[in-house]
Amino acid sequence: MNTLKQAARTITLDEIESILENMPLSHIIKSIQEGFVAYSKGSVVVPPVGEMLFENPPGEAHIKYGYILDDDAYVIKIASGFYQNRDLGLSPNAGLMLMFSQKTGRLETILLDEGCLTNVRTAAAGAVAARQLAPAKVHRIGILGAGYQGKMQLEFLKPVVPCQEVMVWGLDQEELDTYVNVMAPKGYHIETTLKTADVARACNLIVTATPSKKALLAAEDIKPGTHITAMGSDTPEKIELDPAILLHKADIIVADSIEQSHSRGEIFQARLGGTLAENRVVELGDVITGKSPGRTFDDQISVADLTGVAIQDIQICKLIAGATSGKR
């Protein structure tokens, strides 16, 4: 019997970056937003996150996978972060995405993104959260983390939040100076600081994008009317926010995935530090559709805890693969 065999299509990092350069940020944000809605409606199957945590050298590898019901594909993503790679002149991020047919199980597309698409979909999720939860008037954006994701978060906020005043916290002044050199030419007025409290006191939209294992923002420093999007706490031991922020100060607590918040993220850490009622946490997809309330008053404090859900990987994978449809 003759069987038609066709090799899986491979999309290189150069091709992926070329596609992204020509794709409006609003298009990417819309796709990720639609993914959150589908997830919260129960239309997405996402098994528990697979991960490996390494000590020598410190690093982590995440395996996220899933599919949309009645769709054509399922996706498996592997992404790693080895932060001492910078000392070796290497990127701290690596990985790839695999797209399989949901009809036959055959591998159809390999995206050799080296962690690029994880960064993109994470930044787009930050924009979705800000669109739903940021105060009506953002007078200054605060970024905790002067690395690659900290830059991308600010870039993706541009179509959503009309604010060019920025304060950035980083580990050292050299890192901060690099941040300013890259982002100031894009039109931002950037002030830097080595004290996280400065960011909390000066900004009413704060994004945390670090791999920290100790709380960076203290509850007493958070002002009324502030929105915080926390993205760095994607493994059980990471934390960026003082648990008291969620336990005692936040009026609105939003998770990208309530299920994942039971094992990682700021909500998980808050539950370790005290009692956080289940009904205080709502899901981002439900806020988008209006099923759950978001911000209703300017002086409310809101927190979006984004641990990274496989639906984001599915959406960004389909977006890039669709842009190269018909090419081999």
Image: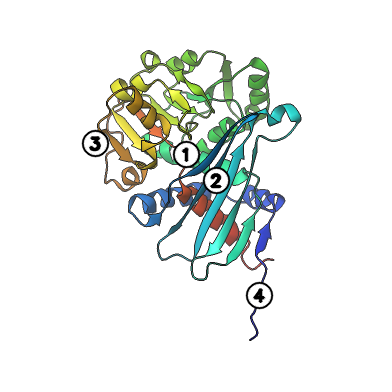
Kindly identify the amino acid type of the residue bearing the numbered disc 4: Lys
Are circles 4 and 2 on residues that touch, CB within 8 Å?
Answer: no
Which label lies toward us, 1 or 4? 4
**Residue 272 position within the rendered picture, expressed as x and y whole percent measured from the top left:** 35, 26
Question: In the rendered image, which quarter is residue 302 located in?
Answer: top left
How busy is the neighbourhood of tag 4: few (under 14 within 10 Å), some, or many (20 plus)? Answer: few
Compared to 165, does 28 lie above or below? below
Are circles 2 and 1 on residues that touch, CB within 8 Å?
Answer: yes
Residue at numbered disc 3 = 279
How far apart are labels 3 and 4 at the CA level? 51 Å
How far apart are labels 2 and 1 at the CA level? 10 Å
Compared to 242, does 81 lie above or below? below
**Residue 161 position within the rendered picture, expressed as x and y whole percent measured from the top left:** 46, 34
Q: In this view, does 102 lie to the left or right of 148?
A: left
Are circles 3 and 2 on residues that touch, CB within 8 Å?
Answer: no
User: Of the numbered discs in the image, which one, if any, rests on residue 73?
Assistant: none
Residue at numbered disc 4 = 5
Q: Earlier in the sequence, mark 3 or mark 1?
A: 1
Are circles 1 and 4 on residues that touch, CB within 8 Å?
Answer: no
Residue at numbered disc 1 = 127
Residue at numbered disc 2 = 25
